Image (spheres, rainbow, N blue to C red):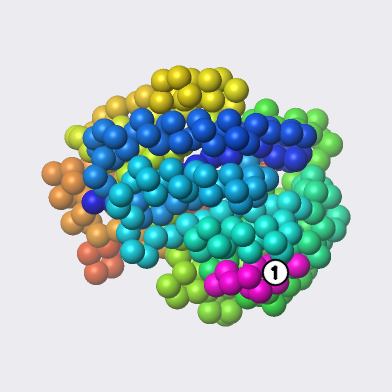
Amino acid sequence: MSFSLYIHIPYCLVKCPYCDFNAYAVRTWPEERYIEALCAELRHYVSRPPWDGQAVATVYFGGGTPSLFSPVSLQRFLDCVAKLCPFVTEDIEMTIEADPATLTRDKLAAYRALGINRLSLGLQSFQPHLLQTLGRLHKAEDGTRALEWAREVGFTNVNADLIFAVPGQTLALLEEDLQQLFALAPEHLSLYNLTYEEHTPFWTMRNRGQLQPVDEETEAEMYLLIQERCRAQGYRHYEISNFARPGFWSRHNTTYWQGGSYLGLGAGAHSYVSEPPWGMRWSNIKNPKTYMAKALTQGEANSTVEVLTRAQAMGEFAFLQLRQLEGFPLSQFADRFGVSFMDAFPHVTELIASGLLQEAAGRIQLTPRGLLLADTIFASFF
Ligand code: SF4
């Protein structure tokens, strides 16, 4: 048995106006104390079931901006992992998310020397005015240079994040972004449409008419363009927003989509264990100061715990597994829940009849048209 380890670093240099992650704009951050809290939390969990004795399969530093933290600090945390988790899988995947504005060549080299073998770069766009709209600190050339440095210091597995459907973006500008992205040849691409999350400045600006979102039709055309161009470049479209060269899919994120167990450490981090009987999840205190105080004194620092019902677990199974373009084997659902997928969700027959889902070789998956309406389809399982 193995599990994935997620570490949330909640600090950023600025808060982007579209972001609803647990992230805080700071000038300074309590790096040492935060690492101590992460180690205390890790010590608490891995000394008890179900985590004790299990191997760590992936480590993912996400945020926020993990690349604000020095390699020395991350080394301290990874030393704790090495000490407290005696087992790691041989081919462990270790990812760090990085904002190009925070990187130097030396820093990247030091991260690589720690054993971090996957870099996820938040490029977002190559258009200066779109980067500005998104409130990003880095310039297009910072992103390009960061990827070049990453290659020089030995990263052979790089993801690049891009955002599309940004106000002011046209299909032609998206095409330019994609061409620049392909020229850098990252092994993995995450391409997300801009969403307007409640309580973000973008949400307010859109509601006040100060921001003109890309219309739905153009957004759908953008998504189709992305799929077509990525496939033509040899990337496999394996999840709604993710594309990878053969063998370079994100193993960490695949844990989430396939319902595997993951332990999330840090302010606002989420955890999930798949047993028993239908799974349990919890999330940590969001405020970094309160999180640190509690983790350092009590080990755990969660604020919500939810034991899933069978109905919830069935809905989540459908929603997460269908995010993957290969879908899932119907027998897997029946084995887990003791009922067929069609009996559990009779409306699936209609979704198939209307061409949104398809069944092939014992698997169920989204159709190309279903991909465009994925959110509506997913909502139907809850
Ligand atoms: S850098 Fe990322 S996590 Fe930080 S505010 Fe911007 S979008 Fe959010």
Task: Identify whether 201 is placed above or below 155.
Answer: above
Q: Which residue is mark 1?
A: 149
Image quarter for residue 337?
A: top left
**Camera-side residue of 371 and 69:** 69
Residue 27 locus on image (x, y percent): 77, 34
| Residue at x 18% of width, y 46% of height | 336
Magenta segment's dominant SS is helix
Q: Which residues are magenta?
A: 145-156
Image mark count: 1
Q: Is residue 341 left or right of residue 68?
A: left
Above or below, 99 relative to 303: below
Looking at the picture, how far across and down is residue 252, in whole percent? 43, 54
User: Depth check: 244 or 263 in front?
Assistant: 263
Q: Does residue 342 appear to the left or right of 297 in the view shown?
A: left
Quarter of the view holding residue 287: top right
Where residue 10 appears, as percent x and y from the top left, is 61, 36
Q: Is mark 1 within 8 Å of ligand 1?
A: no
Picture residue at 41% right of the left edge, 54% below the top? 58
User: Taking the image as drawn, is residue 242 in sight?
Assistant: no
Disc 1 is placed on an element classified as: helix
- Left or right side of 48 for 117: right
Ligand 1 shown in quarter: top right
User: Amino acid under label 1?
Assistant: Trp
Q: Is residue 233 above or below residue 190?
A: below
Q: Picture coordinates of residue 57 (x, y %)? A: 36, 55
Examine the rendering and report whether any part of residue 205 can be seen.
yes
Residue at the (54%, 36%) spot, across then down: 35
Image quarter where the C terminus lies is: top left
Badge 1: few (under 14), some or many (20 or more) residues near its Cα, within 10 Å? some
Q: Is residue 258 magenta?
A: no
